[in-house]
Image (cartoon, rainbow, N blue to C red):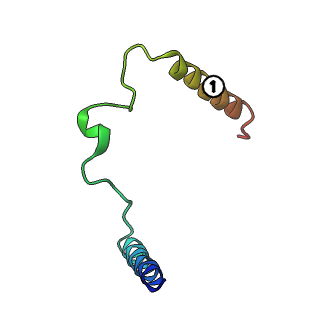
Amino acid sequence: MQNLILAFVLMLIIFAGMSIGFLMQRKSIAGSCGGIGALGMEKACDCDDPCEARQERDRVRANREESWKKNQIT
């Protein structure tokens, strides 16, 4: 039980240190390798003809954005 409490306290100290460092530097958090952007890909699914599930998700997302823009107060 003491090991569990010690590990928890240690993690809290680490998170607090990271938070203080983030607040002091005022920089956005960034990855170290650049992610898929470094590979020249715009998105995770970079195929020319996406599958039906992807097409349906894109349709739903487009409908949601269109509905949001239509109801937006300008």
At label 1, which amino acid type do we have? Val
Residue sitting nearer the eye, 2 or 69: 2
The residue positioned farthest toward the bottom in the image shown: 2
Q: Quadrant of residue 7?
A: bottom left
Q: How many marks?
A: 1
Q: Which residue is mark 1?
A: 60
Q: Quadrant of residue 13?
A: bottom left
Q: Is residue 28 above or below residue 43?
A: below
Q: From the viewer's perspective, tell me whether residue 34 is left or right of residue 63.
A: left
Q: From the viewer's perspective, tell me whether residue 1 is left or right of residue 60.
A: left
Q: Looking at the picture, how far across and down is residue 66, in whole percent?
A: 66, 27
The residue positioned farthest toward the top in the image shown: 49
Q: Is residue 48 above or below residue 57?
A: above
Q: Is residue 74 above or below residue 5?
A: above
Label 1 SS: helix
Residue sitting nearer the eye, 25 or 16: 16
Q: Looking at the picture, how far across and down is residue 18, in whole percent?
A: 38, 73
Residue at image location 34% in from the left, 55% down from the top = 30
Q: Looking at the picture, how far across and down is residue 57, in whole percent?
A: 57, 25
Q: Looking at the picture, how far across and down is residue 37, in whole percent?
A: 30, 38
Q: Quadrant of the C terminus?
A: top right
Residue at image location 38% in from the left, 60% down from the top = 28
The residue positioned farthest toward the front in the image shown: 1
Q: Is residue 71 above or below residue 24?
A: above
Count neighbours of disc 1 (C-alpha within 10 A) and say few if under 14, some if 14 to 19, many if 20 or more: few
